[in-house]
Image (tube, rainbow, N blue to C red):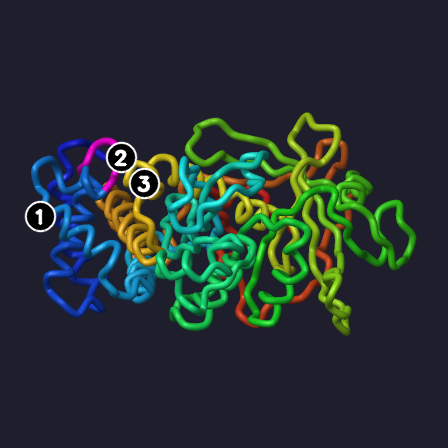
Amino acid sequence: MARVVLPEDSTTEISELIDVLISLLFESLPRRDQRNWARVYLNGLVRTTGKKTIRNIAGTGASSVEQSLQQFISKSPWDWTPVRRSLAQHLERTAQRPLAWVLQPMVIEKAGDRSVGVGRQFVPQLGRTANCQQASGIWLASSEASFPVEWTLTLPGPWTSELLRRRRAGIPDTARSLTPAQDAVHAVQRMAASWQLQRRPVVMEVAGADLPQSIESFTLQDIPFVFKVDGSLPVSFGGAGRYKPGPHTAPARELIDSLRSQRRVVEWTRHGRAEGAVTLLTSASIFATPGEDRPAPAPPIPLLLVGAWTEAALLPSEFWITNIGDRPLAQLFLLAKLTDRVSLDFAETCEPVGIRDFEGRSFRGWHHHATLASVAHAAKLLGARPPVPDGYPGPTRSAAATARPPAARPPAARPPAALPPVARPATPAVLPPHPHLPGQTPRREYIR
């Protein structure tokens, strides 16, 4: 299914879709006037040019509208969680079936110190220290489109330890100061436990310090995951490549590079682009390494380390750790690359509807704005796409991936390669029906 660019004259159709979404997603709002102001705000996010502040949405000379919107967004005590949950359930029924829940970091740089959660902090995505808010979105992602359905806002220490600052921002008593990854992991756990969604693999980037706790948290709840990690991460394994039977510990990059003779070639199409790409993949069985303050699990949690080379690279450049052991490397790689789909939709749709533009100072207001921006994002994408029938759609040309053995290793000389045995979650990863990937035709070879 080709991606459709939203024309200017379709705003009427988008407004009609917003009316439908109001009736479907905002039933938890007890008063009709609240739902009416949600409609006004959503139409403003879609129609207003420039920054999507409350003042710009209200329009010049509309002070009463501005005051009512300010009350609805920043002070009204409506709960955003039921709206987000209803949005996710609606998207599972009406949009293309998601392949994964993708965690996307969002950094919002600020000039002052009054916006809730703002602080001077090092930001890995920027590679520098910045005065900013750090948030994360959880996106339902397929090869064709992605939709944010849940958000976390990370609170630096002073926002939870200083009583006056906490009270002014309306921060709940239950909120704690955690790392962005810890906030995101807890949000995924809540979604998996109470949102009544079919579980999908969680795709996210995790720093080494957060990795042990993230693996343990998802393993305890039987949540499949694909974590992007740094090549310098130490991993434990029993023996592979040039390493004799162990146990051993080595950087992920060294272990994967020792297995370069076992690489497989994957041909695929980048999200949002017409040209194809070639990537070389290999994998190794590893074990989860416990955190410094935690005892080693007995038995150790078996995992799979996946490494990727670009076609001309001498060393592997990307690495993922997963607990999904029953899928070909090509499928795992495509799952990992759904982060590109999310980045594209974030830039093309979510930013234009103002996800970064909230200027209020309250914790409640930030989450209300993020919720409504997520609904506006869904309205724009759903309004620009034909409906998808129930069930997984047939093969398309986008995000295609095919696999073939390297030319240096003829099929006749290569024994069948099997994925190493790793732990399988009780709720299996939901992926396209075997053996076809999105965009794959029956004539193409499938990695096994």
Specify the quadrant of the image occupied by residue 333: top right
Assess whether mark 2 and mark 3 are in contact (beta carbons under 8 angstroms): yes
User: Residues under labels 3 and 2: Cα distance?
Assistant: 6 Å
What residue is disc 1 on? 64
Q: Tell me the amino acid under the disc marked 1.
A: Ser
The question of residue 200 being in magenta is answered with no
Which comes sooner in the sequence, label 3 or label 2? 2
CA gap, disc 2 to disc 1? 20 Å
Q: Nearer the viewer, residue 262 or 363?
A: 363
What kind of residue is marked 3? Asp
Mark 3–mark 1 Cα distance, whole angstroms, equals: 21 Å
Q: Secondary structure at mark 1?
A: helix
Quick one: 133 or 85, which is closer to the camera?
A: 133
The answer to whether residue 15 of the structure is visible from this angle is yes
The residue shown at (80%, 41%) is: 254
Apparent side of residue 275 relative to residue 225 in the rendered image (left or right): left
Name the residue beneath numbered marker 2: 51
Q: Earlier in the sequence, mark 3 or mark 1?
A: 1
The circle on residue 357 is 3
Residue 13 on image: x %, y %: 13, 44
- Locate residue 86 relative to residue 228 in the image: left or right: left
* Residue 51, magenta (yes or no): yes
- Residue 117 spot, x, y in % from top left: 44, 50
Label 1 neighbour load within 10 Å: few <14, some 14-19, many 20+: few
